């Protein structure tokens, strides 16, 4: 079984841990007096961050856990508060005394540590990478995130579900459309209505366009990190053009606010652009395949083995590049519009690079097929109390969203970004690669920090 | 590789000339003049994200694409705060980033300025105060609003900021 998410609820009278697997969902009540539950860490390594997060936010202990360090509570974050418990209502907290964090480090003769971040050299999000090095070779990497921890889950609690859409769509800017669709799907379920097929086609058109923009950007940055700048010029040009198309059809360059109860899309211009994009992408593909020095860097670099990917439950582009058939879009609805799963075998930088090219071409086909003139409306009225979940394939991978509505208000919101799992498997890919390859490998995964940190 | 050069020659220079030109050309010329006057032709920016959604960063990255090509105006993003004249600050300033952002600011040599990118820095935009958000305490010299500001907004903002420097 694949672990999708492990998260906690505060039911006032007790805590509840929900384990979402691909085949089933398990729920366990936890007594509030000395709350404790069995750890999943030894079997599912992806549970490490999930459990450390629950421990920080709810104060629930995990029996058999081998990693009990704080996760979201950094050096100056007060350790004695449990912010996601219902009896915690403070909006302002004071810094505590600096308590050092114990990093995973390898010790030994001529082994040294290279700390990188949280503020990096380029224009990227903050996160810390802690390398243990033997000369040029990387022995171990600990990734430490949650610098961007904004407390989104608490921020939306107690609000009307409709009010929080503007927050949901800005959790992770690159995956905004995916988050919006997941949320709209939940709202539809909560009001016992169904998203009409024609509207779904429009939603998925925008989702594929978002994926195209994200992949185009990566296809420029990956070669750039290997010292091949012309690819960045070429692809950043296309990415900008695609973003302008997004702005034209949704009114926003990132599609914030685009997924509404009713939308109209000007397909004429979009499809003309898709034809142009297809030609350009095919040119890029032929051209880049010939640059031998680039493939020298891409091949055998950053290998995510199939075994590790399965063990960690890796999702999205990274999983498919290692030959694992995981994609939320792998269903009849999508297949009717030309969806084909893109797979590679070895899980190297080159595989993740190739998958992105193939997925762009497939997304172009789908967008052409999604074209529709019909105008149907979704009408979510009253939201029924209950618990709702949704899955959407963002440009990174599977987004899992959970919403519990109580008395018409948000009681608990949780989202598991694909990055949350993939970041944890990341360190397995760099063993014995050189540190200069790290930016390249990082970009080939292109994970979100904001979506991971929440 | 020959194929690429053929394509390269056919494409030519695409740096924004058409629809935005009249307005942008003026902006660009002014920016270039100001950068020359106040920063000896080279303005160095260090971007710090204190808890954004990553859209502001994406738009700053877009400034380097062939359509905007910021570097030809003498403006570039640098890897270290010690090389920077200006800090671009985005995001809501989380508790976990607070001290790192201040460290970064302290590492910058004077004279130095901070430009806020996006609504988050000013009033958190659509976000609301939570326990995990501290809010920014650095003195902001210029705000470039919007969620996120598009590359053209940022260019305009840089010019407006440059006008405030005496």
Image (cartoon, coloured by chain):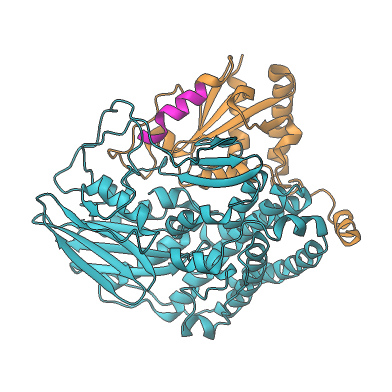
Chain colours: A cyan, B orange
Front-most of residues A57 and A196: A57
Query: Quarter-wise, where is residue A93 in the image?
Result: top left
Front-most of residues A3 and A62: A62
Q: Dominant secondary structure of the magenta stretch?
A: helix
Q: Is residue A214 magenta?
A: no
Residue at 73% from the left image edge and 29% from the top image edge? B74
- Position of B152 with respect to A277 (left or right) is left
Front-most of residues A411 and A238: A411
- Position of A100 with respect to A374 (left or right) is left
Whether residue B94 appears in this view of the structure is no
> Range of the magenta residues?
B93-105
- Position of B8 with respect to B67 (left or right) is right
Establish if A100 lies above or below A205: above
Location of the N terminus of chain A by quadrant is bottom left
Query: Quarter-wise, where is residue A410 in the image?
Result: bottom left
- Position of A256 with respect to A54 (left or right) is right
């Amino acid at each position: 079984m694949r672990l999708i998410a492990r998260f906690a609820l505060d039911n006032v009278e007790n805590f509840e841990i929900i384990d979402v697997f691909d085949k089933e969902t398990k729920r366990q009540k936890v007594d509030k007096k000395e709350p404790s539950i069995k750890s999943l860490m030894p079997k599912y390594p992806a549970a490490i961050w999930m459990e450390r997060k629950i421990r920080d936010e709810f104060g629930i202990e995990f029996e058999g856990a081998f990693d009990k360090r704080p996760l979201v509570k950094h050096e100056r974050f007060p350790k004695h508060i449990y912010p996601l418990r219902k009896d915690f209502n403070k909006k302002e907290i004071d810094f505590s005394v600096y308590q050092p964090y114990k990093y995973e480090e390898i010790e030994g003769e001529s082994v040294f540590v290279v700390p990188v971040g949280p503020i990096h050299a380029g224009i990227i999000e903050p996160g810390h990478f802690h390398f243990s090095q033997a000369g040029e070779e990387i022995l171990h990497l600990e990734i430490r995130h949650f610098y961007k921890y904004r407390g989104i889950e608490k921020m939306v609690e107690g609000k009307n579900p409709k009010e929080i859409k503007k927050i949901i769509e800005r959790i992770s800017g690159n995956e905004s459309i995916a988050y919006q669709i997941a949320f709209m799907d939940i709202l539809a379920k909560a009001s016992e209505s169904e998203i009409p097929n024609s509207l779904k086609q429009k939603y998925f058109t925008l989702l594929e366009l978002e994926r195209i923009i994200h992949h185009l950007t990566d296809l420029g940055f990956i070669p750039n990190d290997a010292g091949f700048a012309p690819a960045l010029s070429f692809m950043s040009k296309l990415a900008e053009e695609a973003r302008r198309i997004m702005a034209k059809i949704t009114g926003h360059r990132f599609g914030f606010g685009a997924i509404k109860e009713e939308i109209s899309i000007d397909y004429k211009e979009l499809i003309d652009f898709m034809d142009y994009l297809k030609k350009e992408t095919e040119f890029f593909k032929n051209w880049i395949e010939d640059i031998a020095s680039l493939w020298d860097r891409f091949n055998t670099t950053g290998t995510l083995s199939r075994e590790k990917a399965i063990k960690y439950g890796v999702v999205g582009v990274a999983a498919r590049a290692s030959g694992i058939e995981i994609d939320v879009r792998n269903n009849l609805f999508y297949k009717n519009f030309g969806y084909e799963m893109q797979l590679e075998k070895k899980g190297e930088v080159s595989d993740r690079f190739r998958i992105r090219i193939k997925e762009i071409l497939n997304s172009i086909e789908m967008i052409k097929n999604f074209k529709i003139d019909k105008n149907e409306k979704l009408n979510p009225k009253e939201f029924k109390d209950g618990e709702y979940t949704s899955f959407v394939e963002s440009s990174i991978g599977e987004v899992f969203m959970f919403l519990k509505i109580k008395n018409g208000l948000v009681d608990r919101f949780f989202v598991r970004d694909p990055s949350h799992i993939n970041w944890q498997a990341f360190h397995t890919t760099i063993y014995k690669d050189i540190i200069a390859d790290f930016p390249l490998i990082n970009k080939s995964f292109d994970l979100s920090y904001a979506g991971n940190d929440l | 590789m020959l194929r690429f050069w053929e394509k390269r020659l056919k494409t030519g220079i695409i740096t924004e000339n058409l629809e935005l030109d009249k307005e942008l050309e003026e902006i660009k010329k002014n920016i270039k003049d100001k950068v020359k006057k106040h920063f000896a032709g080279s303005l160095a920016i260090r971007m710090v994200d204190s808890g954004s959604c990553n859209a502001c960063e994406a738009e700053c990255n877009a400034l380097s694409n062939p359509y905007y090509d910021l570097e030809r105006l003498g403006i570039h993003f640098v890897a270290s705060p010690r090389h920077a004249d200006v800090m671009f600050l985005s995001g809501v300033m989380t508790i976990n980033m607070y001290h790192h952002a201040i460290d970064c600011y302290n590492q910058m040599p004077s004279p130095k300025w901070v430009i806020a990118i996006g609504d988050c820095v000013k009033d958190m935009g659509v976000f609301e105060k939570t326990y995990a958000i501290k809010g920014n305490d650095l003195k902001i010299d210029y705000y470039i609003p919007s969620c996120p500001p598009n590359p053209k907004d940022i260019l305009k903002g840089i010019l407006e900021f440059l006008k405030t420097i005496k």
